[in-house]
Amino acid sequence: MNSFPSEVLTVEEFAKKLHVSRATVFAWIKRGALIEGEHFFKLGRVLRFVWSGQLLAGLLQGSGADRPQPVKAVIQEKPSPINWEY
């Protein structure tokens, strides 16, 4: 029997517990760092994470390259409608 309690989390709750953004969680899924059936499950378009000791152990296992890394936000500035170079 698992000695850690389990709870089902939304993407937002999961990201908050790991202190990352929702975008980071989705980037981890896209890169394959989080695997459906192992780290999360889908109900239609809804994602749920089972927060447990096994999930934490799976995320912390392996080398640094295998572990999910936070994604840094890239902010692209929109060009100004005013030509200040004129």
Image: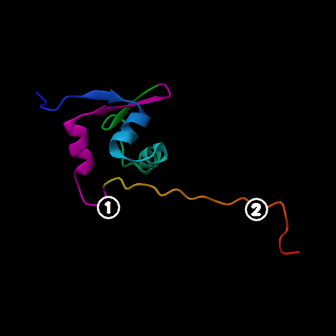
Q: Nearer the viewer, mark 2 or mark 1?
A: 2
Say which of 11 and 37 sits in front: 11
Which stretch is magenta? 44-66
Residue at figure coordinates x 33%, y 40% from the top left: 17
Quadrant where the image shows the C terminus: bottom right
Q: Amino acid at mark 1?
A: Ala
Give the Cα distance between marks 2 and 1: 36 Å
Q: Which mark is residue 79?
A: 2
Q: Which residue is mark 1?
A: 65
Question: Would residue 52 appear left or right of 19 to someone viewing this image?
Answer: left
Q: How many marks?
A: 2
| Residue 20 percent location from the top left of the image | 40, 48
Which circle's residue, 2 or 1, is located before the other in the chain? 1
Q: Position of residue 84 (x, y in %)?
A: 83, 71
Percent position (x, y) of residue 18? 34, 45
Residue 70 found in image quarter: bottom left
| Label 1: element kind | loop
The stretch drawn in magenta includes residue 11: no
Q: Position of residue 45 (x, y in %)?
A: 50, 28
Between 15 and 42, the residue placed more toward the observer is: 15
Which residue is rendered at x = 31% and y = 54% of the image? 67
Q: Residue furthest top?
A: 43
Quarter of the rendering occupied by the N terminus: top left
Q: Residues within 10 Å of mark 2 (few under 14, many from 20)?
A: few
Please say if the residues under marks 2 and 1 sit with CB atoms less than 8 Å apart.
no
Q: Quadrant of residue 34?
A: top left
